[in-house]
Amino acid sequence: MALNKGELVAAVAASTGETQAAVNRVVDALFETIAKSIAKGEKVTIPGWLSVDKGHRAARTGRNPQTGATIQIAAANTVKVSAGSKLKAAVK
């Protein structure tokens, strides 16, 4: 079972009394701001809940599982998400 964006927006709207349209704009703005910050190399931290940071994966040699041929896997930027203490405590 997974909570999708529409269900999240509906739950927050019900909890706060705001309209779903208003909550949807806030959720969109939140993720847009996080994405822009991470792209600039800034770490985003919501104390106790989560932190999001840009990571880097070095280039490496891999193997095609179907043919066994060696392939070069390019370096890539990644996103690291870490759960905070309040989020960890909530799932215990």
Image (cartoon, rainbow, N blue to C red):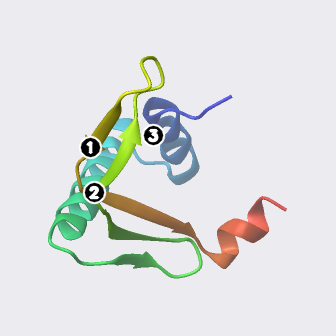
Whether residue 33 sits left or right of residue 47 in the image: it is left
Q: Residue at x 44, y 35 (%)?
A: 5
Q: Nearer the viewer, residue 90 or 21?
A: 90
Q: Amino acid at mark 3?
A: Val
Q: Which mark is residue 72?
A: 1
Q: Crowdedness of circle 2 by 10 Å Cα count: few (<14), some, many (20+)?
A: few
Whether residue 32 sits left or right of residue 17 in the image: it is left
Q: Crowdedness of circle 3 by 10 Å Cα count: few (<14), some, many (20+)?
A: many
Q: Nearer the viewer, residue 18 or 42?
A: 42
In the image as oriented, which residue stretches furthest toward the right? 92
Q: Amino acid at mark 1?
A: Gln
Residue 28 locus on image (x, y percent): 27, 47
Pair 3/2: label in front: 2
**Residues under numbered marks 1 and 2 in contact, where contact means CB atoms less than 8 Å apart:** yes
Q: Which mark is residue 10?
A: none
Distance from the alpha carbon under mark 1 to that under mark 3: 42 Å
Quadrant that contains the C terminus: bottom right
Q: Nearer the viewer, residue 86 or 27?
A: 86
**SS state under label 1:** strand
Q: Nearer the viewer, residue 15 or 42?
A: 42
Residue 48 locus on image (x, y percent): 59, 79
Whether residue 8 sits left or right of residue 92 in the image: it is left
Q: Residue at x 17, y 63 (%)?
A: 36
Q: Is residue 20 above or below residue 18?
A: above
Q: Amino acid at mark 2?
A: Ala
Q: Residue at x 22, y 54 (%)?
A: 32
Which residue is under mark 2? Answer: 59
Picture quadrant where residue 2 is located: top right
Q: Which mark is residue 9?
A: 3
**SS state under label 3:** helix
